[in-house]
Image: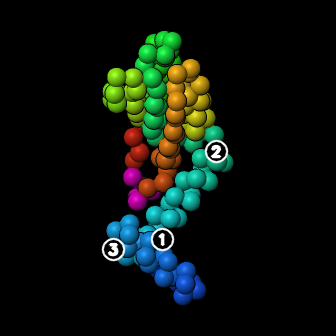
């Protein structure tokens, strides 16, 4: 860990005890690792909330019944319309009726949100979840960041 700055944090004993339980449960080796992750997570949330043009990578998870009125075809149409934002996809047959699809996506906050909203609004989609991480939040902010299109 070259070029780090050490800081002190004051916590009430009860809060520290709860934090130690949490970091132990999550498998962190040190409090510093856990605090760094919390800071990155908070910064990422702010970037996503504040900057519609920030570049993000993420996943869109869809659950749907594949026999419902052309849902597969409509989802495929939307994916083809947005093919530059979809890096990969995985399709799983959960049973005779239900499917799970996970799309790995890249684009601006706005583009990825709009794609997720469009896919989630298709009749027959029963659940949709969007997870995004800004490209700019990383261990080494000077490292080059991939951008696929």
Please name the residue shown 39% across and 31% down the image: 100
Pointers 1 and 3 in contact (C-beta within 8 Å)? no
Check disc 1 and report its element: helix, strand or loop. Answer: helix
Residue 64 position in % (x across, y down): 46, 26
Q: Earlier in the sequence, mark 3 or mark 2?
A: 3
**Neighbourhood count class around disc 3 (C-alpha, 10 Å): few under 14, some 14–19, many 20 upward:** few
Please name the residue shown 45% across and 12% down the image: 73
* Alpha carbon distance from label 2 to label 1: 24 Å
Q: Considering only vertical position in the picture, is 115 above or below 2?
A: above
**Neighbourhood count class around disc 1 (C-alpha, 10 Å): few under 14, some 14–19, many 20 upward:** some
Residues in magenta? 139-143
Residue 71 position in % (x across, y down): 49, 16
Residue 54 position in % (x across, y down): 57, 42
Please name the residue shown 48% across and 71% down the image: 35
> How many numbered marks have been drawn onto this rendered protein structure?
3
The reply to whether residue 148 is in sight is no
- Residue beneath label 1, please? 35
Residue 14 in magenta?
no
Pointers 2 and 1 in contact (C-beta within 8 Å)? no
Q: Earlier in the sequence, mark 1 or mark 3?
A: 3
Check disc 2 and report its element: helix, strand or loop. Answer: loop
Residue 96 position in % (x across, y down): 34, 22
Quarter the C terminus occupies? top left
Front of the two marks 3 and 2 = 3
- Residue beneath label 2, please? 51
Q: Residue most toward the front? A: 96
The reply to whether residue 20 is in sight is yes
The label on residue 29 is 3
Q: Earlier in the sequence, mark 2 or mark 1?
A: 1
């Amino acid at each position: 860990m070259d070029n780090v700055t050490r800081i002190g944090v004051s916590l009430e004993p009860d809060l520290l005890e709860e934090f130690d339980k949490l970091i132990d449960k999550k498998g962190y080796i040190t409090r510093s690792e856990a605090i760094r992750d919390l800071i990155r997570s908070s910064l990422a949330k702010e970037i996503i909330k504040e900057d519609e043009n920030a570049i993000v990578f993420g996943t869109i998870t869809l659950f749907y019944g594949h026999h419902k009125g052309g849902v597969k075809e409509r989802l495929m149409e939307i994916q083809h319309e947005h093919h530059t934002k979809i890096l990969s996809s995985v399709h799983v047959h959960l049973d005779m009726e239900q499917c799970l699809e996970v799309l790995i996506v890249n684009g601006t906050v706005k583009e990825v949100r709009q794609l997720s909203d469009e896919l989630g609004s298709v009749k027959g989609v029963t659940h949709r979840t969007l997870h995004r991480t800004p490209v700019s939040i990383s261990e080494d902010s000077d490292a080059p960041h991939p951008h696929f299109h």
